[in-house]
Amino acid sequence: MKDALIQIFGDKLLGIHEARGETTLEVRPEDLTDVARQLRDGDLFKFVFLSDLTGIDCGAGQFEVVYHLLSMAHQKRVRLKVRLSGARELPSVVPVWPAANWHEREAFDMLGITFSGHPDLTRILTPDGFSGHPLQKEYPLRGEN
Amino acid sequence: MPVSVQAENATGEHLVLNMGPQHPSTHGVLRVILELDGEVVVKATPVIGHLHRGLEKLAEHMTYNQIIPLVDRMDYCSPLINNLGYVLAVEKLLGIEVPARAQVLRVLLCELTRIQSHLIWLGTHALDMGAMSPLLYMFREREEILDMFEEVWGARMHMAYFRVGGLAADVPESFFRRAKTFLAAFPEKVDIYEGLLTQNPIWKQRTQGVGIISAEDAIALGLSGPSLRASGTDWDLRKKMPYSSYERFDFSVPRGNRGDVYDRYLVRIEELRQSVRICEQALAAMPGGPVAAQDPKVVPPEKQRVLTTIEGLIHHFKIMVEGFTVPAGEVYAAVESPRGELGYYIRSNGGSRPYRLKVRTPSFVNLESLCKMAQGQMIADIVAIIGSLDIVLGEVDR
């Protein structure tokens, strides 16, 4: 699959690596929607099922958004990664995978990542009037903030 | 969570009704905002988060072993399957090979867990719709499974019995005898459940043609587990991407074709029978040998050694207090829980605690499809649809 991915996406891929039987692709935020659509629709891939979407605070203002895709036709998974530095914003993939809706709201709520074009980007797990984003690394585990 | 309690359609004809969070049919603390046109639901908006305990944040501050009882408490109807997904992810990171006996025992215990989870689902689902007696039958059988679990490890629900590298200890011989007796009698009990519901005209009227979702919509919305299979999709991780020796077992994956509440019921009923088949095969071909990997860096010594030798005690103490170190990297491991795809994504920076643990819980994703299923249904059907999704709020909110 690796060769096919490199051939199709060319320089849109910032990186591709395989470890522990899992394939990880990295793309730029601006290429995300294009790559996502091709992964979903391409006959070689058919990643029609979005298993998971989440974010990670990598420290020093760096964030990553990680997509786990599943191809039921080929019984394969792939991990798609977008690195964010500076602006914590990237395009929503709800138009590609409607399942992303709540996942993106959760990433927004927990990590403060904004998904532009999301139909209703509101907090989902924390209560009304909550401030801050608990899964950011500087957010304390306990005590008053 | 902020959702304005205002009908979007401000013609004054629609009524906004708040269902929950304290409502017995929401199976926990789920709030659903219903926009109604008479008795017909125009829009259903689930509001979640009432049970949010910050599990993923907590996990970043715990050693890998300490997280095991934590994940138990997400989906409290199937704790062992939560354990399994988690230990598989950590084992993948570590590159540990689990002995055959531990793998098959895991399958056996997970399938018993699936049976008792489906029993809670069916009992409460039927109760929601006014059938009181099924619950009493199902809790009788569930009790028997919980008693067996108690015999295995002392705890009935939150066993925290799986460990990275295998099991906490071997199961007692008496467990096998008990499990055999239970499994021999159980298929007849399933017939009794079916006798109460499958051809029951009230049950059929309340469930057939209600909450329909097509296979395409189900996949697009990330629906998984029995709810996806009821829409006709042949997808079960135990079959398609087997883990923990599931590839050795002979079982079939039931499917529906209409994708309504009734089909979701039929699929789970058949899954009860298939789980019995898996358990029987596991009992018949139980491998011998150890139940934990021989990896002294990860697996603590046997209790006997801890209690009688100073080296054993130190070894145990080091692993329990400091935890074990996991190489840097990231993995995603998923198992087929009674509710669907339960996935663990772990990012390790090489320490004894995960840098990030993300749990993809099936209930969280499946609940999202309520919006789609509820559209155009009658208000009384909402209870049937929520029940048929088999959500556990502990898992939705984490």
Image (cartoon, helix red, strand yellow):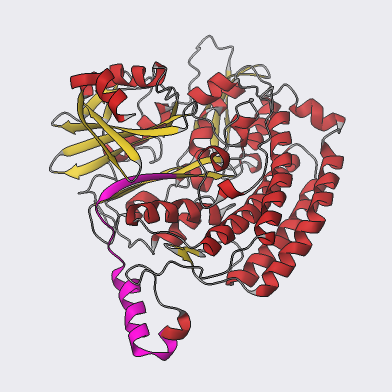
Give the x, y percent position of residue B141.
76, 57
Residue B222 can be seen, yes or no: yes
Give the x, y percent position of residue B216.
54, 19
For residue B109, above or below residue A81: below
Q: Residue at x 35, y 26 (%)?
A: A121
Number of numbered discs overlaid on the protein picture? 0
Whether the magenta-drawn stretch holds residue B315 is answered as: yes
For residue A83, above or below residue B39: below
Q: Residue at x 61, y 22 (%)?
A: B213
Pick the front one: B269 or B297: B297
For residue B396, above or below residue A3: below
* Residue B376 in the figure: left or right of residue B43: right
Pick the front one: B258 or B365: B258
Q: Report the span colored magenta.
A: B306-333
* Residue B256 in the figure: left or right of residue B59: right
Q: Quadrant of residue B87?
A: bottom left
